[in-house]
Amino acid sequence: MMFLGQLRGELRKLFARPRTYMGYAAFFIMELLIVVVYRFTDGQRYMRQLMERNGLESDFYYSSLTLTFLVMIISMALLGSIFFALVAGDVVAKETEDGNLRLVLARPISRLRLLLVKYAAVSIYTFTFVFFVGISGYLMAGAAVGWDGGLFVSEPKMKVFAAYGDWTEGMLRLASGATGIGISMITLSSLAFMFSCFRIKPAAATIVTLAILFVDMILQNFPFFRPFQEYFITWRMSCWVYLFEYDVSWPKLIEAYAFLGGLNFTFFLIGYLAFQLRDFKT
Amino acid sequence: MLELESLHKKFAGKPALEGVSFRVEEGEIYGLLGHNGAGKSTTLGIILGMVAPDSGEARIGGVSVQQKRAQALRAVGSIFESPCFYEYLSGWENLRILSSYSGPFDKAAAEDAIERVGLTERIGSKVRTYSHGMRQRLALAQALLPMPRVLLLDEPTDGLDPEGIKWFRDFILGLRRERGMTVLFNSHLLAEVEQMCDRVAILKKGKRVYEGSVASLQSEEKIFELEVDPWPKAAKFLELQGCKILSDGRISMPPELDPAVMVAALVGLEVRVSSFAPVRHSLEDLYLEITR
């Protein structure tokens, strides 16, 4: 019960920050841009051609569901990583820098519990934000191209191609895909959270996290590393796309999330140890 | 109520505390004095479990902070110089969040604390709109949630105007009177310490160089200011009696000498004595003398 009260406080802090609203606004604008690009420019031509080459009727499959998928995958790749690294990188380091943590650490709460509360809040925040992107993306896409139609998914890197003619099935796949992205993004937040527990500036925690992820993303595409792709964080984070397969590869999915879960635990543990060993002078 | 036993701490190889020990009794207001870097904040950090000592232990109500921190701090409230609240939240939300780290939020207790510190009207406003004095009042309110038995004050009156300082002092003294609260008071404002504290400890370069009651500090003084004529004749006599001439018209007298006898003797020597008054040293004088 007390944990829930503390979690409520952490979430209140996260959601009350001006930066949070700016993040929501930034995502909203980005989603709008993506929808505009795919609705009013030549951007849709490639997608339509791809559908038709696969024997699909592009007028039916170039729909709000397909656009929502594109919005989610593009905005998460471009802005999601930066935003989650920013929020999770702030969660401990910013409070240390601002001096808020002194008032908290003067209370009879263990450091482990404090970090667990903060970690839970960051995870919930990450997860819910992905759904915000999905829902707002769908509303924009629906307004732009209409609410009907099927879902077409093409993700060459993970070798997933699928088309769902039934709207309900498509929507369920999108919802499960959003859940998958949310879980995957928690790994990114965990990495930033770990650095946030170190004696570094909040911006440094964000930058180091992003640097690691970008290097990880680039290296996995080097021919030398191709055989080891599955050991890269960002490759594992992309496993949510399997949820769009006709027959979901549950073993692959479970393996990937177990890998990410192990990483999350390790990141938290390292962050906790660093935090526990720190002295906070008044 | 509060015991510190042989605390040692080094930062990057440099000693910050070297065997600091003291004990604060229940209901006592204890002042901790020292220059910047003397080890006051480190001491407070160790008491709150924010700093791990290299050796030694702090105990609150007999419970070791180093071994059972959460249990030891259950009855402790603290205020820091320039308390940093969540600026984008209201005072009420800050209290709610901070007190949730100590236990379930008690709305009635929070309202009572807010009323006590006189913040009822502005508690719903964002903290960023608060003045320094209001922030200190909010800090006091959060320290009282839940009502502590020990209050740790780290430079709480810094930056307050004289009215604010007096209000703060009266408030703390009132808490002690009403609830028998134990207070550890760390301040640079020596006049405040003098007016509030029963006993003081002075730290210098990580070592405790003095501990005693404020009253006893002052009673040890044997400095007198004289208005006599002729001064050279009086000075020569007093020096012969064992007094130390500090400056023209100012002497230090050994405790065994009786000032009344000295005055009578001076008058007998045909020295005109207009004034022979003891100088009560302020804590500031003593502090500077000890830490020099």
Image (cartoon, coloured by chain):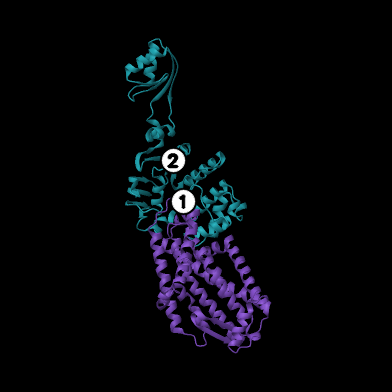
Question: How many marks do you count on the picture?
Answer: 2
Q: From the viewer's perspective, is residue A51 above or below residue B38?
A: below
Foreground mark, 1 or 2, reads 1
Whole-percent x, y for residue A208 in the image: 46, 62
Q: From the viewer's perspective, is residue B250 above or below residue A100?
A: above
Query: Which lettered chain is shown in purple?
Result: A
Whole-percent x, y for residue B126 in the image: 60, 55
Give the side of residue A123 with respect to residue B16, left or right.
right
Q: CA distance from mark 1 to mark 2?
A: 17 Å
**Camera-side residue of A150 and B120:** A150
Instruction: Report the residue marked by disc 2.
Output: B197
| Chain containing the residue with disc 2 | B
Of all residues, the one furthest to the front in this rendering is A223
Secondary structure under tag 2 reads loop
Say if residue B182 shows up in the picture: yes
Q: Residues within 10 Å of mark 2 (few under 14, many from 20)?
A: many
Residue A134 position by quadrant: bottom right
Determine if marks 1 and 2 fall on one subunit. yes
**Camera-side residue of A271 and A31:** A31
Instruction: Report the residue marked by disc 1.
Output: B78
Give the side of residue A37 with respect to residue B202, left or right.
right
**Camera-side residue of A264 and B36:** A264
The colour with which the image depicts chain B is cyan
